[in-house]
Image (spheres, rainbow, N blue to C red):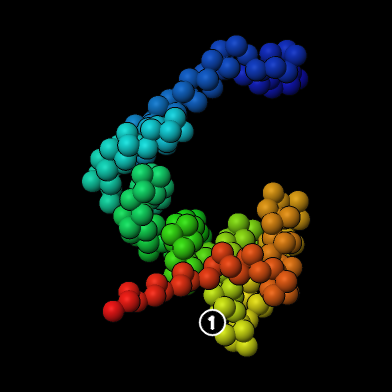
Amino acid sequence: MNRATNPWKSERGALRPGLAIFVALLIAAAVMLSYRYMTRATRLNNEAVEQMGLGDYEKALEILDQAQILDPDNREVLINRGIALAERHRFDEALQSFERAAQIAPDDPLPLFNRGYVLHSLRRYEEALEPLRKAVGLKPDHAEAWLLIGECEFERFLAQYLADKTAAKPEPAREAYRTYLRLKPDGRDRRKVEQKLDILAKPEEFPSALDRRRPPEEPAPPPR
């Protein structure tokens, strides 16, 4: 009795050339089909990302504006648009874009981190802490978010220390910095973080750090 043979295989067990071509055609058809059903907003978003990679944020914004008109609730479009807006120093619009992305994808830490990053860059430390803490709540191992939390808390501590030494609490900054070091022991910011931990321990020994953050003295009133 002859054994049944697989018509798709050669005597050596390899796929016959005809089947290999058939499989390749199936793959090509699947790729074409997925591209056809890819939304125009997604294609525009991909084009914008290419422009951002080239450093042309103005062109990227033009493309992302078109994508947002087509799909106002596209998370990736909103995030990339926020980045492009921030690069063009249109910070309020960038913050709005990140906030909308966070509303659409409440379980995604990325728009929250980006929003906190922009607020930190603007030295709006109190405001930055809320989205950053939400980000680490969603992703506890988000090292860069912990670093920014530490930076915000560090600035808050020094401001409090200058206003009232007894009210200044170093623990929030210290905890955030130590979490960052635990998550990223070889991070490029390790030395800077260790220096700031020293300042938190004994701020009076680092007068230059305090002087840089003192509010400017009010000018004396002109003589009468």
Question: At x 43% / y 33%, what residue is drawn?
Answer: 55
- In the displayed structure, 64 sits above or below 145; it is above
Question: At x 47% / y 57%, what residue is drawn?
Answer: 121
Residue assigned mark 1:
163
Q: Position of residue 11 (x, y in %)?
A: 73, 12
- In the displayed structure, 207 sits above or below 32; it is below
Question: At x 73% / y 21%, what residue is drawn?
Answer: 3
Classify residue 27 as left or right of residue 102: right
Mark 1 lies on a secondary structure that is helix
- In the displayed structure, 53 sits above or below 160; it is above
- In the displayed structure, 160 sits above or below 26; it is below
Q: Position of residue 120 (x, y in %)?
A: 49, 61
- Can you say which quadrant of the picture contains the C terminus? bottom left
Can residue 142 be spotted in the picture?
A: no
Q: Observer-nearest residue: 11 or 90?
A: 90
Question: At x 73% / y 71%, what residue is drawn?
Answer: 205
For the image, the number of numbered tags is 1
Q: Observer-nearest residue: 165 or 84?
A: 165
Classify residue 124 as left or right of residue 207: left
